[in-house]
Image: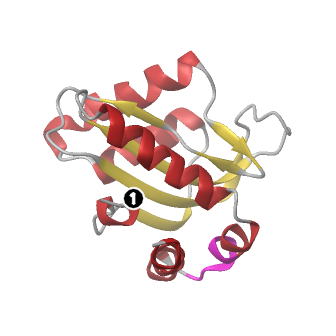
Amino acid sequence: MRFIDLLGPDAVAAGLRTGSKHRLFEEIARRIAPGDVALGVLEALTEREAMGGTALGAGAALPHGRCDALASPVGGLFRLATPIAWGADDGRPVDLVAALVVPVQFTGRHLELLAELAEAFADPGLCARLRVAPDAGALRGELAQWSARRG
């Protein structure tokens, strides 16, 4: 399973408008989780972020968490219309966000998916293409092409 395989139809957005990290987490939970578990996903993202910021630097963040209400992992890829201050070590606000929430028992695979996403956001070419992708389909397509090249 690759991260791209977790992205449902509403789980990718280009130009997402949100005014704060908390509002972004609410929107992410709404988009990636079934209605009955969206609150659990929001809590998982919020609790993990409170333990330590998930900004990677260079304008990218990887909010993630574990949720006992999930039966399978969920994820989302978002480019924000306006970058959000995130407390990154480099001081740069975040405009690229990949969110991942997994079931509690999903330990090893969780770490593999996080490593995949960290590798993706460490690729300056991919990040540049994600920043200029005209819509959600193109955003998803760029990640899919990167993932296919990765193998």
Front one among 16 and 12 = 12
Please, what is the dominant secondary structure of the magenta stretch?
A: helix
Query: Please, which residue is most extreme toward the top here?
Result: 51
Q: Is residue 105 left or right of residue 145?
A: left
Q: Residue at x 45, y 37 (%)?
A: 64
Residue 19 appears in the picture as rendered: yes
Residue 84 magenta: no
Residue 133 magenta: yes
Estimate how packed mark 1 is, as few (under 14), some (14 to 19) or many (20 or more) residues with alpha carbons within 10 Å: many
Above or below: residue 19 compared with residue 8: above
| Magenta range | 129-134
Q: Position of residue 134 (x, y in %)?
A: 59, 83
Q: In which quarter of the image is residue 95?
A: bottom right
Above or below: residue 15 compared with residue 135: above
Q: Where is residue 34 in the image (x, y as percent from the top left)?
A: 18, 47
Q: Quadrant of residue 39?
A: top left
Q: Which residue is drawn at 43% across and 39% down?
A: 111
Front one among 138 and 35 = 138
Above or below: residue 147 compared with residue 64: below
Element at badge 1? Answer: helix
Q: Quadrant of the C terminus?
A: bottom left
- Residue type, numbered disc 1: Phe
How was the colour assigned to the protein in this rendering?
Answer: secondary structure
Q: Where is residue 9 in the image (x, y as percent from the top left)?
A: 29, 69
Above or below: residue 49 compared with residue 140: above
Q: Residue at x 24, y 34 (%)?
A: 103
Residue 27 appears in the picture as rendered: no
Front one among 25 and 51 = 51
- The residue beneath circle 1 is 3
Q: Position of residue 126 (x, y in %)?
A: 66, 72
Query: Please, which residue is most extreme toward the front here?
Result: 151
